[in-house]
Image: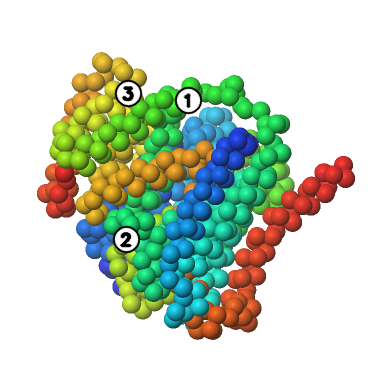
Amino acid sequence: MQKQVDPKADIILAIGMILFSGLIYLGSQDLPPPRYEPMGSAAVPQGLAVLMALLSVLLIFRALPHLKTFQASANQITDVTPRPVLAIIVFALTLIFIALLDFGILSFIPAGILYMTAIGYFLTHRNLKRMPRFFVFSVLMVVSNYYLFTRVFYIDLP
Amino acid sequence: MEHLLNSFSLLLQPLPLALLFIGVASGIIIGAIPGLTATMLITLTLPLTFFMESVNAITMLVGMYVGGISGGLIAATLLRMPGTPASIMTTFDGYPLSQQGHSARALGLGITASFIGGLISWAFLAVLSPPLANLALTFGPWEYFTLVLMALVMLASLSQGSMIKALMAAALGMMVHLPGVDPSLGQMRLTFNLDNLEGGLSLLPVLIGAFAVSQIFKDIIVIDREPPPVHLDRKGMVLSLADIKKYAGNFFRSSCIGTWVGLLPGIGANIAAMLSYTTAKNVSKEPEKFGTGHEHGIVAAETANNAAVGGALIPLITMGIPGSVVDAILIGALIMHNLEPGPLLFTTNPEIAYGVITAYLIGNIIMFGIMMFSVVHIARMLYIPRAYLLATILLFCIIGVFAVANRFFDVWIMLLFGVIGFIMERTKMPLGPFVIGFVLSPIAEMQLRSGLMATDGSLLPLFTRPFAATFFAISVLSLLWPLFIEWKNKNRAGRH
């Protein structure tokens, strides 16, 4: 059976989509009117924005009646403990890694080794005993990928 | 026929054959590991195909498609964890049969069914594609526009869960493709004064973000989930001739269902397996046995999901319309290689069109060989430590996306779509319509605008041109049918 979605999440999703539709609609208002053909450049963005907003409103109407009756299945028995914080940490490390490369603070090889080792540290639940092996693995992966892309495919990595 | 034979001789050369082998083998391995899918593998491989000849690249991707769908049955049978969504139905009977001590038999049935499904579906692909491509050559903008509309609406109405969310996902995919140059007039739009947006959002960052990155974060959340140990030997894996005869009817019926469902634009192998399994149960004299390790259940599900791959390739090479999400990515691959998906492919690049057909057949044969001889070893891949796997894939996502255009803007976009894809998954907004909307959006807009230009703004051809009217009618029916069913169910519930 499919897990029910919290109606609050549906409402937040719908509001987000309405805001996005508004952005698209407003962004296409400055486009020139049609000259050589009946539709012009703004018609499709505006049409899709209106459609998205309508669907979002419909989703809100469908979710509202379930707001009071919905019971979160947080205490449902699962086979493993979910680790959302771990995902957030890896996401943050990824942001830092990309920023280091994008702003030219570190080059690919040192940044990549640091990044993979750090991810490994957290994904192995901070088990220091497994770190030497993960570090060697990181070095091999980063260096081999670097040479594959720069020497075989002739693509410069930062 | 001549083109087909040429294609065989081309693909049986060492390099294309080796790439096809690599494609199928990697597809099987990735398909076997729960959480990693053929879609993810193909998306991640796209950047590497830039450096290959188009035929070789497409051949390898088709191999991955075949392998990825087939590999899903290993985890589904041994662990009740579908390796890919297409093998969900295989868990119903494959796992119970495996638990009864017949793992090899369950796997043998699944592998043989996948192979036969692929062969029958290949026959349809080879026979139907050239005439369908000829027919599609007569299509004008209205036919193409309504075909795209039909693909999106059918996909939304057949998606599991809320149809509203599926339609929202399709609309979102189309909207994401809007920034950049307007495909009809060359007018810049929705760039919000950002230079990087002038070229629009590229296919790869969006796809890799939505499919691969979001999946990695999903997998990290349940990283402690470890597959239980299984014992497996190959004894009893090879089916006898009597077995083949016993299941011949099921093989053929499920192949036809799989091919037909695959042929419908936008609908993939998971729906095919579901429909085929339900049909097998409905026509069975012992329906109560389904779900308890019944061999017919495995045959129905695995034959259909593989046949759907061949079926889905038909609209892809004949009309440039994706039969499933993976096909949408294959369309993207064709576009990246400066090839125009659609009926003209048969005349302008017959080596590609027939190459897809031939690669599908050879890929199935390779898949059968690999699976039969090394399924015991492949099953060990299920136990690769997740930390190593996820870290490697994440690094590869970043390098792959950066390598396409050597700009970090794409990497940031990938990360953004990773978050969007994750939120979509969490809120049960399907990713399939999103990707198909993204890929088909420019085609739909261009065809609609060309049609309107030709008719001075009149929408009448939607009703007067036979094919366009049919596709339009199917779209409207697909939209209304689920609403009608819901209304009927509510009325029935009210009466009780």
Residue A63 to residue B456: above or below? above
Q: Residues within 10 Å of mark 1 (few under 14, many from 20)?
A: some
On the image, the x and y values in percent for residue B128 come to: 49, 72
Q: Residues within 10 Å of mark 3 (few under 14, many from 20)?
A: some
Question: Image point 32% across, 61% down: which residue?
Answer: B198
- Give residue A122's mark: 3
On the image, the x and y values in percent for residue B254 come to: 58, 55
- The residue closer to the viewer here, A84 or A149, is A84
- Give residue A103's mark: none
Q: Amino acid at mark 1?
A: Pro
Label 3: chain letter: A
Q: Amino acid at mark 2?
A: Glu
Q: Is residue B126 visible?
A: no
Outermost residue toward the left? A151
Residue B364 to residue B355: above or below? above
Q: Are marks 3 and 1 in contact (CB under 8 Å)?
A: no
Give residue A141's quadrant in the image.
top left
- Give residue A82's mark: 1
Question: Image point 29% across, 55% down: which residue?
Answer: B196
Residues flagged by tags 3 and 2 on a common chain: no
On the image, the x and y values in percent for residue A62 come to: 68, 44
Q: Determine which residue is flagged by label 2.
A: B198
The Cα atoms of the two marked residues, 3 and 2, are separated by 39 Å
Give residue A12's quadrant in the image.
top right
Structure colour scheme:
rainbow
Outermost residue toward the front? A30
Label 1: chain letter: A
Q: Is residue B93 left or right of residue B394?
A: right
Label 2: chain letter: B
- The residue closer to the viewer here, B401 or A1, is B401
Q: Is residue B486 left or right of residue A17?
A: right
Q: Amino acid at mark 3?
A: Phe
